[in-house]
């Protein structure tokens, strides 16, 4: 039978046997962000197109070439979010977070959409963990933000990442830099791609971020932005570096980092890997002191980063990073017959009410088939429930890893199960030189 359709190019299914890996990465990122004082924010997957044109910048590749933009039924221009910062900034303003105590620290887990050529580590629908810190101009915030990203990688066991930082200055000192770039590129203007020829007057720094091999070659000897920083931007960048050193965070200054979005000012940074091919930037971000007022708010210095989850998972796979074992069911109940099935449903409800994961065979197959199914699912324990077990109020609880069986009472099954599972976990624990003994609890099904 032929499928009527397949997944759209540049998208990817995450199957149950792999979902626990991305859940682990997400949970680690959430917990780390919380340790730094960040709280979750959720924004719509689509916004008015103007938000990204104003925020991201209409001279960027993202806006010019990559956005999924369409008119809705009301004739409004709508865009699927290509990144998370603009939506978070809009929510910060619209919901009055700007009137709360500053800085406001938020994080998000977003699906994002860009029309790019799909390859390893670059999808058209991708997922991003991002953090935004609204309302601080201190270089201490820049260093803490980088430390947060670094801590996520450390907790996941990722190694070999290279932190590269730069300062692209403020609008004042960048004006002089733009003049230097225009003078440099003007001599080879005809060799630039059509897009970059248009950027030369409006935003020549975007040429440094062009994907065209020809433009990249021309840009290799372009002036460095760090040579044009004003005193304030220079001092800010020096302090960021001193605070990174205080935290023992290694870095290199790369004057070619400009990031692909127009809202950045001063500090920009990337965590780069050489282990996953061309798409080696796993995390990138920086300061965007002018974005909030560009969107209609009061001037609010801010900063943030985005971390690509697919690229991070690709890197972890390449490095053989360890994942926790996926969660397994605590108990599989094998019910034989209608009477036993009714009791099994009651038992499953009681167990789940106490927080245990319990499975049953919804196809009601034979004893042998159900046992094979329980083994395939990796259940820790099984219990066979038939009419005799219901009548006698006794069942045999079987540990699937050892085959050991323990008889416990159905009427106090939850307590009895807890006792047996605790005994298994504490089997090697000695108290006063003697093994901890739950034997009496097995028979009564009682706990203190």
Image (tube, grey):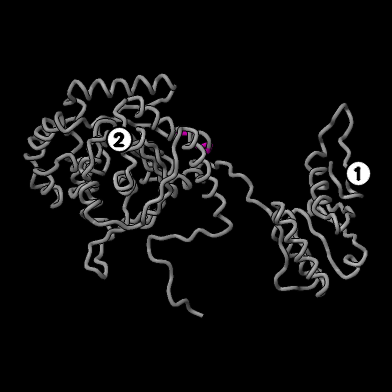
Q: Main secondary structure of the magenta part?
A: loop
Q: Residue at x 17, y 40 (%)?
A: 218
Q: Is residue 398 left or right of residue 129?
A: right
Q: Which mark is residue 327?
A: none
The quarter holding residue 85 reads top left
98 versus 358 height, above or below: above
Q: Residue at x 6, y 39 (%)?
A: 187
Looking at the image, which is closer to me, 280 or 100? Answer: 100
Q: Is residue 324 magenta?
A: no
Please give the residue where the numbered disc 1 appears in the rendered image. Answer: 439
The quarter holding residue 221 reads top left
Q: Which mark is residue 302?
A: 2
Q: Is residue 17 left or right of residue 278?
A: right
Instruction: Provide residue 51's location: percent of width, then percent of height.
Output: 24, 51
| Magenta-drawn segment | 156-160
Task: Please identify the quadrant where the C terminus is shown.
Answer: top right
For label 1, the crowd category at 10 Å Cα-Cα, with few meaning under 14, some 14 to 19 and many 20 or more, is: few
Give the CA distance from mark 2 to mark 1: 61 Å
Q: Can you see residue 217?
A: no
Q: Is residue 158 magenta?
A: yes
For label 2, the crowd category at 10 Å Cα-Cα, with few meaning under 14, some 14 to 19 and many 20 or more, is: many
Q: Can you see residue 160?
A: yes
Q: Residue at x 12, y 35 (%)?
A: 178
Looking at the image, which is closer to me, 229 or 394? Answer: 394
């Amino acid at each position: 039978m032929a499928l009527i359709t397949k997944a759209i190019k540049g998208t990817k299914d995450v199957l149950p046997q792999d979902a626990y890996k991305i859940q682990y990465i997400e949970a680690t990122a959430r917990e780390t962000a919380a340790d730094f004082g960040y709280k979750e924010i959720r924004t719509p997957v689509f916004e008015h197109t103007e938000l990204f044109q104003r925020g991201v910048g209409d001279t960027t590749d993202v806006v010019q070439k990559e956005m999924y933009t369409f008119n809705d039924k009301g004739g409004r221009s709508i865009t699927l979010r290509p990144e998370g910062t603009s939506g978070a900034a809009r929510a910060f303003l619209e919901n009055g977070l700007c009137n709360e105590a500053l800085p406001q620290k938020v994080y998000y887990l977003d699906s994002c959409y860009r029309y790019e050529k799909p390859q390893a580590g670059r999808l058209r629908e991708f997922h991003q963990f991002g953090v935004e810190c609204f309302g601080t101009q201190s270089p201490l915030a820049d260093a803490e933000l980088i430390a947060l990203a670094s801590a996520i990688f450390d907790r996941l066991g990722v190694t070999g990442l290279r932190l590269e930082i730069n300062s692209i200055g403020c609008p004042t000192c960048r004006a002089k830099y733009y003049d230097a770039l225009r003078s440099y590129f003007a001599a080879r203007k005809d060799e630039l791609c059509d897009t970059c020829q248009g950027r030369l007057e409006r935003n020549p720094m975007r040429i440094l971020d062009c994907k065209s091999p020809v433009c990249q070659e021309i840009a290799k000897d372009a002036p460095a932005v760090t040579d044009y920083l004003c005193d304030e931007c220079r001092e800010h960048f020096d302090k960021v570096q001193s605070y990174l050193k205080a935290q023992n965070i290694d870095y290199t200054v790369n004057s070619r980092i400009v990031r692909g979005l127009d809202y950045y000012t001063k500090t920009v940074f990337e965590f780069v890997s050489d282990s996953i091919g061309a798409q080696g930037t796993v995390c990138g971000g920086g300061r965007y002191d002018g974005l909030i007022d560009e969107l209609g708010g009061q001037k609010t210095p801010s900063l943030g980063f985005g971390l690509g989850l697919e690229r991070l998972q690709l890197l972890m796979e390449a490095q053989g990073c360890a994942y926790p074992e996926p969660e397994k069911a605590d108990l599989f109940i094998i019910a034989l017959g209608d009477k036993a099935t009714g009791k099994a449903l009651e038992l499953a409800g009681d167990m789940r009410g106490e927080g245990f994961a319990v499975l049953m065979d919804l196809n009601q197959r034979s004893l042998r088939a159900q046992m094979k199914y329980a083994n395939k699912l990796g259940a820790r324990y099984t219990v066979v429930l038939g009419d005799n077990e219901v009548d006698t109020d006794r069942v045999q609880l079987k540990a699937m890893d050892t085959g050991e069986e323990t008889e416990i009472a159905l009427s106090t099954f939850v307590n009895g199960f807890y006792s047996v599972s605790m005994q298994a976990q504490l089997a090697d624990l000695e108290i006063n030189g003697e093994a901890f003994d739950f034997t009496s609890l097995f028979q009564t099904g009682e706990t203190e």
